[in-house]
Amino acid sequence: MKNYVFGIVGVLILLLLANFGYKHLSNAPINLKSSEQIEVTIPAGTGSKQIVAILGEKRLVRSKWGFLLQEYFLGAKGKLKAGVYRFSQSESGAKIIKRLEAGDILPQDNKVTIPEGLTLKEIAQRLEKAGIASADEFIFDAKVEKFRDKFEFLADVPNGSLEGYLFPDTYKFFKKTPVDEVISRMLERFDEQFKVAAKETSGLGTHKLHEIVTMASIIEREVITPDDRRVVSGILWSRIGHGVAMAADATIRYALNNWDKPLTVTDLKTNSPYNSRTNAGLPPGPIGNPGLDTLKSAMDPKETDYFYYLSASDGTSIFSKTLDEHNANVQKYLK
């Protein structure tokens, strides 16, 4: 009887060990119910140990040694190919190895350049033209509330459009990349670059993130050179501090979606919260998506005696201290 009991216990132990070995040495799927596709980049020249480390960081394999043993027994050692893949936690280690050996990479990527200052709508049009995403779908999905839980910096940003937070850069997206992933990439880039801007300046100071981004978006459309941007930043913050309208015509252009034609007298009286001639303070939100230098300008304004500025036809900024000087400059440079 005693031997019988020991026999049963032994069988149970063997079954437990077998189950442990199956899960941890054979790299059984981590989550059979998972449908999430996890993007993985395997750089050229990456060895097996580095590959399994990358997969481990993405929580796609259970055991480093189990993966390496499977690679050996499957005859795939030294045959795993570089590239960009999408794997799921529902895939076994063996399946992942076979896909790596076959070079089952994502389709050829599309590149798109997003210049500084473009609006969300303009970005959407560029993405559609590049064959990356539907413009309408991009605009529909680019909402703060949809990404707030994923990005901490959006915690206090008002609900609504992600205007201002889609960082301008050159991106590579694979064909059929989900729109949410496209937006996430741009938000990740914003997060990275905003931290750089904050580190190289005094940071937010007494302002909120949304105020800084809104100011930066206005400066981006108003001024060309980095030095002038800091001066204009100081002027606009000073005007807000004195309760005077900013009178930045780029805000009116945003309200009218008119970036090319001259503004008329009627345009300047447009009834819109974005009209910074008729409303004091900042508009409700950004009027475009600013770059790194302009974010830094908004955080690090230059204090001067100037209270007015205008942009000459060649893009040069002309500054003045008094309204009389400013009016004289208007006649001289914008006649």
Image: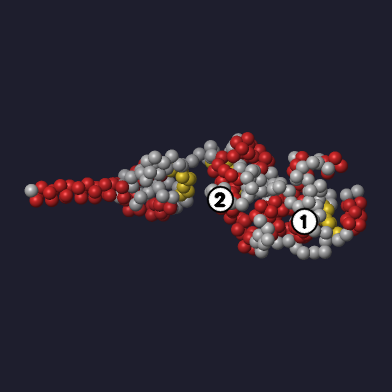
Across and down, in percent, residue 7 comes to 13, 48
Name the front one of labels 2 and 1: 1
> How many discs mark residues in the rendered view?
2
Amino acid type, mark 1: Ile
Neighbours of disc 2 within 10 Å: few (<14), some (14-19), many (20+): some
Q: Is residue 199 left or right of residue 218?
A: left
Q: Residue at x 90, y 54 (%)?
A: 327
* Label annotation for residue 163: none
Rendering quarter of residue 134: top right
Which SS class for mark 1?
Answer: helix
Which SS class for mark 2?
Answer: loop
Q: Is residue 224 left or right of residue 95?
A: right
Across and down, in percent, residue 157 comes to 63, 50
Across and down, in percent, residue 329 comes to 89, 55
Across and down, in percent, residue 54 comes to 43, 52
Q: Residue at x 54, y 43 (%)?
A: 181
**Mark 2 or 1, nearer chain start:** 2
Question: Is residue 235 visible to the viewer in this orientation of the structure?
Answer: no
Q: Residue at x 64, y 43 (%)?
A: 160
Q: Is residue 68 left or right of residue 255?
A: left
Amino acid type, mark 2: Phe
Question: Is residue 9 visible to the viewer in this orientation of the structure?
Answer: yes
Q: Residue furthest front?
A: 243
* Label annotation for residue 151: 2
Q: Is residue 321 above or below residue 272?
A: below
**Looking at this view, is 163 or 112 the one in front?**
163
**Looking at this view, is 294 or 207 the one in front?**
207
Disc 2 vs disc 1: Cβ atoms closer than 8 Å? no
| Residue identifier under label 1 | 240
* Distance CA(mark 2)–CA(mark 1): 29 Å
Neighbours of disc 1 within 10 Å: few (<14), some (14-19), many (20+): some
